[in-house]
Amino acid sequence: MEREVPVVMTQGDVFFDIDEVDGQFSMFDPSYAGSIVLPLSRTMNETIKGKVTVNDIELDIVWFRTFTQFKNTQVLGLPVRHIMREYGKGYKVRIEGFVDMTGIMMEPEEINVRTLPRKEPVSGYEEHDQVALEAAREGIVLLKNEGNILPLSKGELLNVFGTGLFDFRSGAVGAGKINPRYLINLIRAIEEHSGFTLNSEVQALYESGIETLPDKEILESACRQSKVALIVISRRSGENQDNSAVPGQYYLSSDEEAMIRAVSGTFEQTIAIVNSGYPMDMAWVEKYNIKALINCGFAGMFSGLALVEILDGRVNPSAKLPDTWSYDYYDHPSSRNFYDAVDGKPVLNSSLPQFVDTYYEEDIYVGYRYFETFRKAVAYPFGFGLSYTTFGLNISSLEYGQEGTTLKVQVKNTGNTSGKEVVQVYAEEPDGKLEKPFRKLIAFAKTEALKPGETQEIICHIPIIRYASFDPDTACWLMEEGRYIIWAGTSVMHVQKAGEFELAENRTLKKVVNRMVPPVPIQTLSKLDPEATYPQGVFSGLKTDATELTPKANRPKYQDKLPVAAEVPDTIIKYTDVIQRPEQLDSFVKQLSDEELARLSVCGSSGWGMHEKGEAGRVFLLDRHDMKPFVVADGNSGVNLRQPNIGMPTSTVVCSSWNTTLSYEVARVIAEEATENNIHMILAPGMNIHRNPLNGRHPEYFSEDPYLTGMMAGYFSKGLEEHGVSSCLKHVVANNCETVRNRNHSLIPERALREIYLKAFEVALEVHQPDSIMTGYNAVNGVFAAADEEMIQGIFREEFGFGGYVMTDWGSYETADIVEAVQAGNCWMTPGTNDDTYVLPIVNGVNDGRIERVRLEKNVWYLLKVILKRAQG
């Protein structure tokens, strides 16, 4: 009798990385965190419970799911991370009792699973590793230190409570994922890189991954051995799914709260460590009298080491929050207009045909602009962070001129420990026709490490445009008459008056034209009548009867001001000729057929298959031209491939350093490792605004403030490109959630769009002109971002002077019309295929007049210009 084909498709032993807390598949389903994922040859009946054992230990739960991302392959997920705890060990997994959809029971199968050996430092990367470590050190924020209980004695016994000790996360999931050469998590850091010791009895409570309430005897025994308790709270976050304002995500779970109540009630000195990709509930810190609080975020491959260095005082924390940490999620005005599957609302995914409308009724009042203006109490304000030393700021001078302001500040270390401080400069502007937020960030700078008693002068040159506000009625950037007060300090709430100046009359700084205007009226929050105008969210949410964008907006068409050469060359120009003589690029493009232009406009597929390298895409190489490869990869925090490489902190942690030089250096290292892996472009920086803390991609982005975001992202982009690798600013624009992200319709007042969401990109482009930008999945004011000619041509090309190429996000053409995207000036459709699936619609678009040949030529010209630059070294 012929043996049936095995149900579980494996190629030899299966390998499992116990250092990877979440794993690739948790991007699509959080249930798959810490799981082995096995593709199946037959579709199994998910309602019939089989049996899975790991070394004879039966798993209580297994997961079935069919992933469209992997050719509709059904997979079996086995959560094993809390069983497979030893490095380099073999485990026997036995699977039996499952039945396929035809009623046939599978034969029992045994699979050999081997955990990867513990990774160690790799010779030759010491300098790169040092940058990753420094980024973690400067990005971990000390938020509370009552009685200066930190730093701890180096010989302290640590009673560490919470599953976060084992589920300590170093990075996000999805595009922001890292695959580090090695990892020093919290346990390893304590055991190998500190003088601390772990209380093994407490540690054993959490090895199962279950948040356990310690009994009274264990607590009292632990307290007799050490008066210090550490609580570690960890949260996953990443691409494809937003977080939720529910227990266990934004809020503490009931088990976590019970544990914290018991621990803080026993120990006099309770220290909490928040290992979360996003700001979460902070009310419990005061409720349970937590003495010290550290937010370490996702701090990369050295997250554990940097944390213990701060705990024992080897490193003095210098980070500042890039976001406001509220007391409660619903304190954010955007919470009324952010889809969250609570109160009976369904969990939504990207396969839905309906749209989710998101009205930005809070207008310009995002983050601290809201909390400061409306005097709403917060747990920790924007820009806040403590140090083990103290600093004094003395204003040396403030000079105001027609072109801008120059502020000089003397920063003195007045304490007993060497440390760094961040000078933050805010403007308080007069209300006029346009109401203004109470304060807005206009400059910042970080000192060098100052020894006790040492002083450094910080000089901030503030261009006049930083004071401008956008008037939609006149399409002008204005300074309105009145008094301007400059504040300097160490957070938005901890400032001193630096000076002021008076403007006698309104001043127009820049005239543009109205663009991306909302197609419907949007009531916006106003400090003149906050009760009547506070966001209600009535118009936001799932549109159950709408399967297309409504309402639609009329947008102007744009003539490309830089057409390629008008004449087809007499002789064939080869690609290699253009590398030697770039001035021939116009003619090279002009000679290409419609089919070749269309083929270059479509990415040559990705390498995300289960046994592929992991690159995000590559430019298709035309048959008759000797073109050189151009390969792109994700990588806000590393080179997102299956080949191990550097693992930097997430963008939010890097931004917490408030150090543009460090952001540049982080990107420089990523560029050098990308080059080693034959990657020509890193799809970073991600730089959407932290409008709402529940955004799943919160850790991949920088800040709630557009100026801070733009500066840190601009230097990141510069660091990549000045070291030979192209960058891509993403996602343009207002891609501020993951729920139904390819059908999420952002309806934004033009002033907020320009002052908050576009402003971040505008500032970044002022720092450095990148090789590419990526349009978002979402629609904005009636038009998909991928097909928004007014945004691409009008704002980015004409207003911002952008000269690189524009690409879609991966799979945007599943919702945005591919022909409209190409005609709008979107140059590269991703991830594409190697056949004509997405090429033919472009060719047909040229033939039927929906795509102008000159626009298609110019799109390809922009793309090839970048590719040639990298080919030339």
Image (cartoon, grey):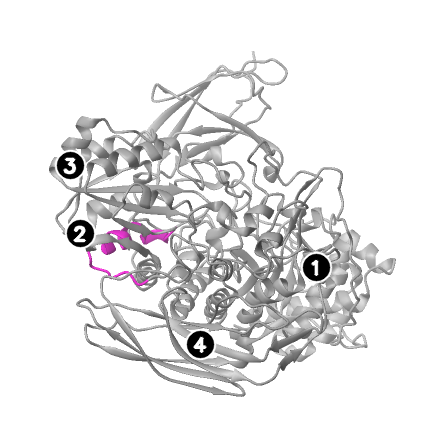
Q: Which residues are magenta?
A: 298-318
Of badges 3 and 4, the one in the foreground is 4
- The quadrant holding residue 353 is top right
Secondary-structure class at tag 2: loop
Mark 4 or mark 3, which is nearer the start of the sequence? 3
Which residue is painted at 41% across and 44% down in the image?
281
The residue that disc 3 covers is 223
- Judge left or right: residue 194 versus residue 817: left
Q: Is residue 736 above or below residue 434?
A: above
Cα separation, mark 2 vs mark 4, equals 39 Å
The residue that disc 1 covers is 601
Q: Residues within 10 Å of mark 1 (few under 14, many from 20)?
A: many
Residue sticking out furthest to the right: 848
Mark 1 or mark 3, which is nearer the start of the sequence? 3
Count of picture labels: 4
Mark 4 or mark 2, which is nearer the start of the sequence? 2
Mark 3 or mark 2, which is nearer the start of the sequence? 2
Three-letter code for the amino acid on which mark 2 is drawn: Leu
Magenta segment: does it hold 246? Answer: no
Q: Residues within 10 Å of mark 3 (few under 14, many from 20)?
A: some
Q: Are marks 3 and 4 in contact (CB under 8 Å)?
A: no
Q: Are marks 2 and 4 in contact (CB under 8 Å)?
A: no
Image location (x, y in percent) of residue 95: 45, 20
Secondary-structure class at tag 3: helix
Secondary-structure class at tag 1: loop
The residue that disc 2 covers is 152
